[in-house]
Amino acid sequence: MELKKYFAGTFLNTLFRFNFGIKVFDSLAHPYYVQGNIVEVMEYIKKQEMQSGIHPIVNILGESANSASEAVDYNSWYNQIIEMTGKNNLSYLNISEKPTQLVVIDDSLKIIDSSNKQLVSALEQHVSKAESIGLESNKTIRITLDMEDHRFTDLSLNTAKQLWSNGLPLNIVLQSCLNRTEQDITDLFSKTNYSFADEKIGVRICRGIYLEPKAIATTDKKIAKKRLLARVEQLSNYGVYLQIATHDKEVVYEAINLLEKKNVPKKSYEIQGLMGVPNTALLAKELIAAGHNYATYFPFEMIQGASYPYLMRRLKANPNIMWYGIKNLFQTYRDERENNKRKLLKG
C-alpha cells in the first residue's frame, strides 16, 4: 500500500506540472463526482433514483468556507436543495453537510462564534425546513452533519445532541477507525428521551477516510473493518436508522447477516457507497433486488476546482482510486471506439 501511495503521489505531482495533466486528472476523476449547477445536479440524481431505485445522498464539494460570505453561499445552496427536493419527483434525499462549510473556522480551529450558535442555527434551519417540506410533500429528506477529522468530532456530536434535545432529528456520521467511537455511541444513545422516534436519527457508520494519528485511531484496515461490524451491532441496539458505508462486499453481507440474526427489519437500515467506485452499481442492484435499501453518495462540484482537495484526500487514503480511474478512462475510450464502429457499419 505504501508503494502505491508513493507512485500515486509521484504520478499526480507530474500531472499537475502541465496543463494537459490537469485535463487528464479531470478525465480520471470524472466518474467520482458530478459537475453542474443545482438544477442540473438535482435532475441527475432524480434520474439515478428512478432508474436504479437507490437512495441518493448529495454533498456540495468544498473542504471549508474561507470567509463569512462563502459560508452564506453554502447555507443558501443547501437550502435551495431542500426546497427543490419538495418540488421534483425525488422520493428520498439525504443531504450531507460539512460543519466547516456552514461556519468559518480560524487557524486555532475555534469557531469564530465561540458559543457554536452559528452552526447550530444553520442546522436547525435546514433540519426544520427538511422536516416541514418532507411532511408536506410526503418525502423523506434527511440532513446529515458529515464527519471531518478527529479535531471536529466533539463539535459535531455536541451539535447533534443539542438539535436532538430541541426535537430536530439531525443525522450523524461515526468512524470505526477512531478509538473513541464505541464510547461515543454509548454516550449518545444509552440515556435518551427525544421527542421523536429513534429511527428518525440516521447514523452513518464508516471506516473513515482521514489519516488520523496512531495514538487515537487504528490505521489497520482489517481492524477498522472488524470495528465497523462491532459498531453496527452496537448501534442496532438503539433503534436508529443504520447507514452502513462500505464498498467491501464481504463486510456488507456480514453486516446484513448480523442484523438479520437480530431480527432488524430491512426498512431500518441501508448500505451506502460512493459513485464511481467499481462494482458499486452491481452491488446496489443485487441488494435492491433482495429488498435492501441502498444509498449512493453523489459529491457535486459547483465551484470549479472544489473537487481537487476532496479527490486528493481520497487518493492519499486509497491510491487504488487512481487505478480505477485509469481503467474507467480506457473503458470509456473503448466504448466510444465501438460506438463509432457501429455507426460506420450502419452508415
Image (cartoon, rainbow, N blue to C red):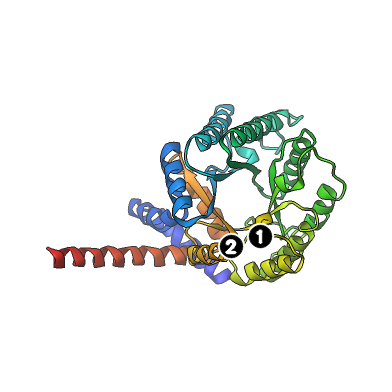
Circle 2 residues within 10 Å: few <14, some 14–19, many ≥20: few
Position of residue 185 in the picture relative to residue 40 (left or right): right
Q: In the rendered structure, find residue 105 and report the number of the disc placed on it.
A: none
Compare residues 260 and 295 and report the one nearer the observer: 260
Indicate the quadrant containing the N terminus: top left, top right, bottom left or bottom right.
Answer: bottom right
Element on which disc 1 rests: helix
* Image side of residue 235 versus residue 16, left or right: right
Give yes or no for contact between labels 1 and 2 (Cβ–Cβ under 8 Å).
yes
Which residue does the image show at 59% across and 60% down from the upper left? 317
- Of the numbered discs 1 and 2, the one sitting upstream in the chain is 1
Confirm whether residue 199 shows in the render: yes
Residue 113 figure quarter: top right
**Amino acid found under the numbered disc labelled 2:** Gly
**Residue type marked 1:** Lys
- Residue indicated by mark 1: 266
- The spot of residue 205 in percent (x, y) is 69, 56
On residue 291, the disc is: 2
Question: Tag 1: Cα neighbours inside 10 Å, few (<14), some, or many (≥20)?
Answer: some
The one nearer the camera, 15 or 119, is 119
Instruction: Residue at 85%, 44% (x, y): give it.
Output: 192
